[in-house]
Amino acid sequence: MMVMFNLIKIFFCVGLFAFGGGTAMLPIIYQGVSVFGMSWSDFSDIVALSQITPGPIAVNASTYIGLEYGGLAGAIIATLAVCLPCFLVMLIVIKLIDRFKGSRIVEGAFTGIRPVTIGLILSAVIFVAGGVLVKGPVVSAQLAEIDYYNWIPIGICAASMVLMSALKVKPIYVMLIMAAAGALIYGVVL
């Protein structure tokens, strides 16, 4: 019962207070699920799975975490808990937006909010990058001796950015290519 209460509390707060989209919510989600004793490595796996499955990352992550710690009921509760605040806030905003549409104050608020979302997304990038690029997977004793950046994930990250931005490869194909590269490098070579 306590697990279900914690799932509701964590994901309702994530849905209510985490602005900037699913990626910006990641540090808040990790901080919340740390009560379950989840390791950074396990959370990184959840982030990866949430990115490659269809749907919003926060919903996917909440569903997976709920399933992991509370079974099917936990998955349903966590998913509803993360979605409910957004739904309620949007109902209120929809009612009020037409009333204040031409307001300079509202326009000013939106002008101030737009750069914040970039900051939230960048902070999530730094949060995830710190765990993946710096710590990276250690798969051999030789790599364990290296106490600086793990260059393989950095190379995969750089190659992904080139494929998507310069060569305009669709993100799903980039994920599949890099999953195959990771499996080959970490599963066969190292």
Image (cartoon, rainbow, N blue to C red):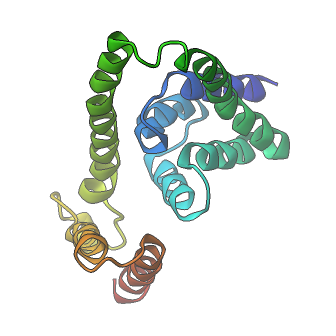
Query: Is 105 situated left or right of 84 in this image?
Result: left
Report x, y in % for residue 47: 49, 53
Q: Nearer the viewer, residue 154 or 16?
A: 16
Q: Residue at x 27, y 34 (%)?
A: 119
Image quadrant in which the N terminus is located: top right
Q: Quadrant of residue 105?
A: top left
Q: Residue at x 41, y 38 (%)?
A: 24
Q: Quadrant of residue 95?
A: top right
Report x, y in % for residue 27: 41, 36
Report x, y in % for residue 97: 53, 20
Q: Residue at x 70, y 28 (%)?
A: 84
Report x, y in % for residue 20: 42, 35
Q: Quadrant of residue 52?
A: bottom right
In the image, residue 70 sits, relative to residue 137, either above or below, namely above
Q: Seen from this angle, which residue lies furthest front?
A: 102
Query: Is 17 situated left or right of 186 in this image?
Result: right
Image quadrant in which the C terminus is located: bottom left
Q: Residue at x 64, y 24 (%)?
A: 85
In the image, residue 114 sits, relative to residue 59, either above or below, namely above
Query: Is 63 situated left or right of 42 in this image?
Result: right
